[in-house]
Image (cartoon, rainbow, N blue to C red):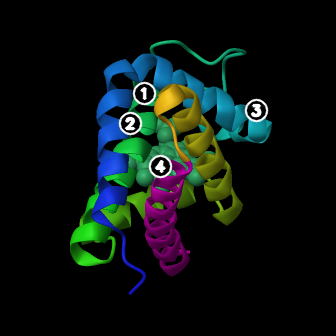
């Protein structure tokens, strides 16, 4: 197998440990970047659609940002330990149906990926490296693939 290395796992884990110290700023930056890349995504999120600005300190906004970062970090750990991303059936089913219901489609995952990577680059500053980006990118791709497969099955 391609093999997700221990170094890659460490890069993801350590950068998440550091980034999660500043969740309010991180989640705001993440959502600003999503909307910069894809303004139409605004209509999808309950907490964005009725306001002109991205709300500061909105718990749902923070929750989605944390979920994406944290689950990608967990995916990295699993890739190293098991060689694949394993999500419990209930969690996966819920993820599949929530995203389907909100009208999320395949290309949106690319938007969120780009926003994730740009946010990491900005947040990590001098500690950022190509290897770090590659590790996050691989873990995200595998996680997104699992969610997309579930969405296809439910559609
Ligand atoms: C909700 C995770 C990608 C849009 C959620 C929830 C989780 C989650 C855990 C909450 C589910 C619940 O309410 O029980 C993830 C992960 C992603 C991902 C791990 C990528 C790996 C995306 C993408 C979009 C998206 C690409 C579209 C741009 C949404 C929306 C909601 C949601 C609109 C409902 C939020 C609300 O309005 O409260 N996601 N998501 N997600 N997700 Fe994602």
Q: Which mark is residue 62?
A: 1
Q: Which mark is residue 132?
A: 4
- Residue at left 38%, top 36%? 66
Task: Of the two numbered discs 4 and 1 on the same chain, state the one appearing first in sequence.
Answer: 1
Query: Which portion, as a residue range, is magenta?
Result: 130-155
Contact (Cβ within 8 Å) of mark 4 with mark 1: no
Q: Which image quadrant is residue 52 in?
A: top right
Image coordinates of residue 111 in percent, x first then y, are 68, 49
Task: Of the two numbered discs 1 and 3 on the same chain, state the one appearing first in sequence.
Answer: 3
Q: Is 126 situated above or below 72?
A: above
Relative depth, front residue between 13 and 24: 13
Image coordinates of residue 131 in percent, x first then y, are 50, 54
- Residue at left 33%, top 29%? 18
Q: Quadrant of the C terminus?
A: bottom right
Q: CA distance from mark 2 to mark 3?
A: 19 Å
Label 1, secondary structure: give it. Answer: helix
Image side of residue 64 versus residue 46, left or right: left
Relative depth, front residue between 153 and 122: 122
Task: Tell which residue pokes out farthest to the bottom in this image.
Answer: 1
Contact (Cβ within 8 Å) of mark 2 with mark 1: yes
Q: CA distance from mark 2 to mark 1?
A: 6 Å
Q: Which image quadrant is residue 139 in?
A: bottom left
Can residue 18 be seen here? The reply is yes
Q: Of tags 1 and 3, which is closer to the observer?
A: 3
Q: Which mark is residue 36?
A: 3
The residue where tag 2 is placed is 66
Task: Of the two numbered discs 4 and 2 on the same chain, state the one appearing first in sequence.
Answer: 2
Q: Which image quadrant is residue 104 in?
A: bottom right
Q: CA distance from mark 4 to mark 1?
A: 23 Å
């Amino acid at each position: 197998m391609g093999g997700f290395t221990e170094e890659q796992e460490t890069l993801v884990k350590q950068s998440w440990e550091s980034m999660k110290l500043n969740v309010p700023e991180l989640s705001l930056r993440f959502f600003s970047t999503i909307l910069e890349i894809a303004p139409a995504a605004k209509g999808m999120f309950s907490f964005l659609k009725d306001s002109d600005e991205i709300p500061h300190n909105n718990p749902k906004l923070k929750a989605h940002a944390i979920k994406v970062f944290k689950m990608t970090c967990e995916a990295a750990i699993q890739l190293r330990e098991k060689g694949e991303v394993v999500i419990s059936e209930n969690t996966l089913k819920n993820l599949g149906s929530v995203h389907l219901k909100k009208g999320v489609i395949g290309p949106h995952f690319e938007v969120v990926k780009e926003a994730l990577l740009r946010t990491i680059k900005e947040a990590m500053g001098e500690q950022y490296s190509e290897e770090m980006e590659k590790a996050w990118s691989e873990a995200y791709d595998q996680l997104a693939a699992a969610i997309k497969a579930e969405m296809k099955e439910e559609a």
